[in-house]
Amino acid sequence: MKPIKHIFAFLFTVFILSCHSSNQSNVPVVGFVDAFEDATISQARTGFNDALKKNGFSEDQKNIKIEYRNAQGSIPTLTQIVNYFVFEPVNLLATCTTLSTVTAIQKTKTIPIFEMVSPTPERMKVLDASGKAPSNLFGACEDLPYIDTSFSLIPKLLKPKGAKLVVGMIYNQSEPQSQDAKERIQSLADKMNITLVALPLNSSADAQLVTQSLLDKNIDAFFANPDNTVFASFETILKSCEQHNVPIFTSEAGLVKRGAVAAFGADIYQWGYQAGQQAAQYLKTGKKDGLKPEMVKVRKRVYNPAAVKKYNIAIPANFEPVK
């Protein structure tokens, strides 16, 4: 048995060395971490890669290597992915959505992290005792005030069935930014004399059941807030809402393309592109000077022509149709 054990030990050593071989060359390695599979969120990765290409970094030219991993919604898998990239180590991490970013922050204090589709460091609760963000965190982030404009669209575009507009929403109790968004929307609803019915959804598997519970409360509209669980289960939510003639509004332009009526929100592709621009700057200079988490620069007012027609809604002239 001993010779066999020696063979396995040898093969394992060769495997480990081969994993590190990519970092032994002069080609920089990017570890791209996606928390889950989603048609809208994937646009960020495309934007990030396009920004690198625009700045001369392309796998076709063999001057960069992008190792992509998707956790498929599994937190243990996400942790393993980040640990692997840190162990190699890669030259930089690109993290898409909050869970990926927070996990990366927890696992490394030295490898530069370029976040996208994630909130501000304050919203992620990753500030240190002195109120500073991690020194290795960069990229593009978003704060909650942009939700205000999107939510305020609802009373402007809809006529309530009753005396008071009733809006339903789903939030994820395990995600700090989702809980924060829910509290902000509740505050907005109170100021606008809107009844908000909010139910927790911590797993996309329960999306249909929770959405039906909202619809049973005779809501006039559904607000899809920036929440990973909402993204992952959007088609289920959309189908149920359409069956009950309840329009969906959102703060995410990507969800409008998938069936929501309208939004004033971040362009996910541009969000990734903005993070990619920062990553390219770091790759060019090898320095972090001037880099920091910055707010998303590109937001769009968009509407879905099919949804607008279905619900007979008049859209302001400054909104453009999704393509």
Image (spheres, rainbow, N blue to C red):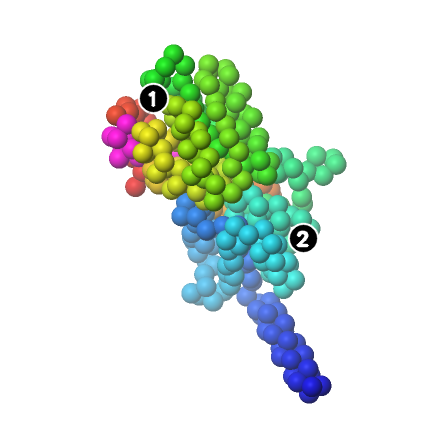
The answer to whether residue 105 is above or below residue 322 is below
Q: Quadrant of residue 139?
A: top right
Give the magenta-colored segment's residue range: 299-311
In this view, the residue in front, 277 or 214, is 214
Residue 300 part of the magenta segment? yes
The answer to whether residue 4 is above or below residue 192 is below
**Residue at image location 64% in from the left, 76% down from the top:** 12
In this view, the residue in front, 290 or 117, is 117
**Residue at image location 67% in from the left, 53% down from the top:** 108
Q: What amino acid is labelled 1 in the image?
A: Leu
* Residue that badge 1 annotates: 157
Q: Is residue 248 left or right of residue 19?
A: left
User: How packed is label 2: few (under 14 Cα within 10 Å), some, or many (20 or more)?
Assistant: some
* Residue that badge 2 annotates: 108
First in residue order: circle 2 vs circle 1: 2
Q: Is mark 2 on a helix, strand or loop?
A: loop
**Residue at image location 32% in from the left, 27% down from the top:** 318
The answer to whether residue 276 is above or below residue 150 is below
| Rendered location of residue 131, percent (x, y) | 70, 34
Q: How far apart are marks 2 and 1 (CA)?
A: 46 Å
User: How packed is label 1: few (under 14 Cα within 10 Å), some, or many (20 or more)?
Assistant: some
| Rendered location of residue 16, percent (x, y) | 63, 72
| Rendered location of residue 283, percent (x, y) | 56, 56
Q: Is residue 90 left or right of residue 237?
A: right
Residue 126 part of the magenta segment? no
